[in-house]
Image (cartoon, grey):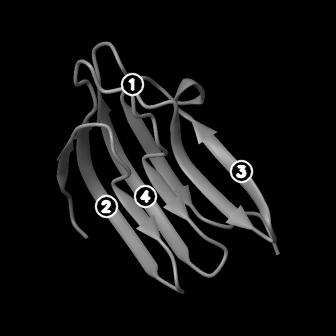
Amino acid sequence: MLGFKTEGRTTHIAAGSGARVEVLGGVSYQSWAKQELDPPMFIVDSTSQASFTFGLYHTDLAFTTIVEETRGGVSARLLGKDLSPYHLPLYRSGAGKK
């Protein structure tokens, strides 16, 4: 996918059942008052492959988890606090794992 825009606090992409997903650019407008949901922005299961580069826009209520990936029954999370405030540079699922 070459770019997309989202609004609100919901999972934007859930890659499952052997999916192969690539998102090159886009923006997530994350701040919506009175939404208590805080799901992962992207979810990748152990049967799928995904690559993301994405812009993040928020003022008050940023997503806590940007990517949640499960491999071999173990879930790992890429947290928003570990990124620059407004950008997911490039995430590739399973990177560095065999």
The amino acid type of the residue labelled 4 equals Phe
Looking at the rendered image, the disc whose residue lies closer to the viewer, 1 or 4, is: 1
On the image, the x and y values in percent for residue 61 come to 36, 19
Q: Is residue 31 above or below residue 52?
A: above
On the image, the x and y values in percent for residue 76 come to 71, 50
Q: Secondary structure at mark 2?
A: strand
Answer left or right for 15 relative to 94.
left
C-alpha gap between disc 1 and disc 3: 19 Å
Answer left or right for 57 relative to 13.
left
Residue at x 21%, y 66% (from the top left corner): 2
Q: Secondary structure at mark 3?
A: strand
The amino acid type of the residue labelled 1 equals Ala
On the image, the x and y values in percent for residue 56 come to 32, 34
Looking at the rendered image, the disc whose residue lies closer to the viewer, 1 or 2, is: 1
Residue at x 23%, y 43% (from the top left corner): 27
Q: Which residue is mark 1?
A: 62
**Earlier-in-chain disc, 1 versus 4:** 4
Q: Secondary structure at mark 4?
A: strand
Viewer-proximal residue, 18 or 22? 18
Q: Which residue is mark 4?
A: 52
The amino acid type of the residue labelled 2 equals Leu
C-alpha gap between disc 1 and disc 2: 21 Å
Q: Which residue is mark 3?
A: 76
Q: Which residue is mark 2?
A: 24
Answer left or right for 90 relative to 33.
right
Q: Where is residue 30, by image quadrant?
A: top left
